[in-house]
Amino acid sequence: AAAASASYKKLQRPKGTPCAHPELPSTEALSPAAMLRLALTVRLLQAPPGGWVVPKAHITAKPAKTPTSPKEQAIALSATFLSFLLPAGWVLYHLDHYKKSSAA
C-alpha cells in the first residue's frame, strides 16, 4: 500500500501548475461543493476493486465412487442433445405456419 501511494504521489502535478489539458478547468476555479464531490469521486476510484474476499472452494479431483457406464453416458448425452434440438426443430419445421398466422 505504501508503494502504491508513493507512486500515486509521483503522478500528481504540483499545486499552482496549469492543467495539461486546456479544455479542463483548473481546480482553483471549482466551488467548495464541487471540490468535495471531486474528492469523493477520486476516493471511490482509488478504492480496491471487489470489496468482499470470497473464500477459495475446496474442490478435489477424485475418481467417482460409482463409475458411470458407457450406456448411461450415451443415454444422458442423448437426453441433453434432444432437450435442446427438439424444441428448435419444432419451431423451424412450423416456421411457415408461424409466419402465416402472424401476418393475418
Image (cartoon, grey):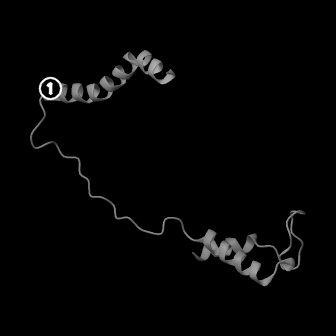
Q: Residue at x 81, y 81 (%)?
A: 31
* Residue 5 image position (x, y, % from top left): 64, 75
Q: Is residue 38 left or right of residue 15?
A: left
Residue in front for this viewpoint, 23 or 84:
84
Near mark 1 (Cα within 10 A), the count class, few <14, some 14-19 or many ≥20, is: few
Farthest left residue? 66
Task: Specify the quadrant of the image occupied by residue 3.
Answer: bottom right
Residue type (three-letter) at the residue carrying disc 1: Pro
Looking at the image, the residue that sits furthest to the bottom is 32
Q: Give the quarter of the image for residue 97.
A: top left
Residue under label 1, please give it.
70
Residue 88, x across and y down, in percent: 36, 24
Q: Residue at x 88, y 79 (%)?
A: 16
Between 28 and 100, the residue placed more toward the observer is 100
Residue drawn at point x = 75 percent, y = 79 percent: 35
Q: Is residue 101 left or right of residue 14?
A: left
Number of labels in the image equals 1
Name which quarter of the figure residue 83 lies in: top left
- SS at mark 1 in the image: helix
Depth check, front residue: 82 or 43: 82
Which residue is pictured at 27% across the width and 25% down the height?
A: 82
How far across and down, in percent of the image, does residue 100 sit? 46, 18
Is residue 96 toward the left or the right of residue 14 in the image?
left
